[in-house]
Image (spheres, rainbow, N blue to C red):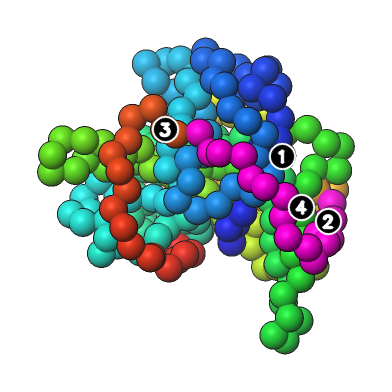
Amino acid sequence: MCGRFMLTATPEEVRRLFAHLDLPNFPPRDDIRPTEPIGVVVVAEGVRRFRLVRWGFWPSWVKDPRDFSLLINARAETALDKPSFRAAMRNGRCLVPATGFVEWRRDGTKRTPFRVVPRAGGLVAFAGLTETWSAPDGSEVDTAAILTVDANATVGAIHDRMPAVIPPERFAAWLDPATEAKAAAKLLVPAPDDLFELEPLAAKPPPPRPRAPRPARSAKPPDGDGQMDLF
């Protein structure tokens, strides 16, 4: 699963890779956590746009998110069939810009954190799903989950799952609403073994975290402590 990730690239670097119309203003963030706003790239009216959404997926049919599990990941193998993600696989596909993610290796009761970063540096694109949840008062919250696949050989040394990475030459196919969901699902494969490298994280308190940006359109998220389910 992916429960922490980083985006330390500048807004200009993100736009250069993803070719979206907007130039948002956001700080570098090296410890992005569930329920925080994350940046995603979507296609809207034929144009790539950058959006801020809540990391924690709420299907549109959920009546009260306080009674719904916290879905930060979606298993690529079952997303086409799961009621929570079926509609988003058809018309809610997105890209999640990142400069790496954090995963933990379990040794009995001991958990050792590792930073998983591109070997060549720079940005990668995680495959994601978005959906807009509408509250009874008419307010809306745009939400997202990151798709996961079996780990490649590198990440497999510490964990059995990893985010699905979409290479730049497949951005258009993944984002295009005309791409059928079954065809899009075939793009969700483990990244090449040499794409990432592992960096052990020092066992020390993290530095102060910059204030996370807020989504442009959102209602105040309801209170509640959901579990991080992996579907």
Q: CB atoms at circles 4 and 3 under 8 Å apart?
A: no
Q: Say which element carries label 1.
A: loop
In screen coordinates, is 156 left or right of 136? right
Which label was assigned to residue 99? 1
Cα–Cα span, label 4 and label 3: 26 Å
Q: Against 49, is 192 above or below?
A: below
Label 1 sits on what residue type? Thr
Q: Residue 230's x, y, as percent?
A: 48, 64
Sequence-first tag of 4 and 3: 4
Q: Which residue is mark 3?
A: 215
User: Farthest residue in the left direction?
Assistant: 136
| Residue at 51% in and 28% down | 41
Q: CB atoms at circles 1 and 4 under 8 Å apart?
A: no
Q: Residue 31's x, y, as percent?
A: 64, 49
Label 2 sits on what residue type? Leu
| Residue at 52% in and 13% down | 21
Which label was assigned to residue 116? 4
Q: How busy is the neighbourhood of tag 3: few (under 14 within 10 Å), some, or many (20 plus)? A: some
- Closer to the camera in the image, 173 or 39: 39
Q: Say which element carries label 3.
A: loop
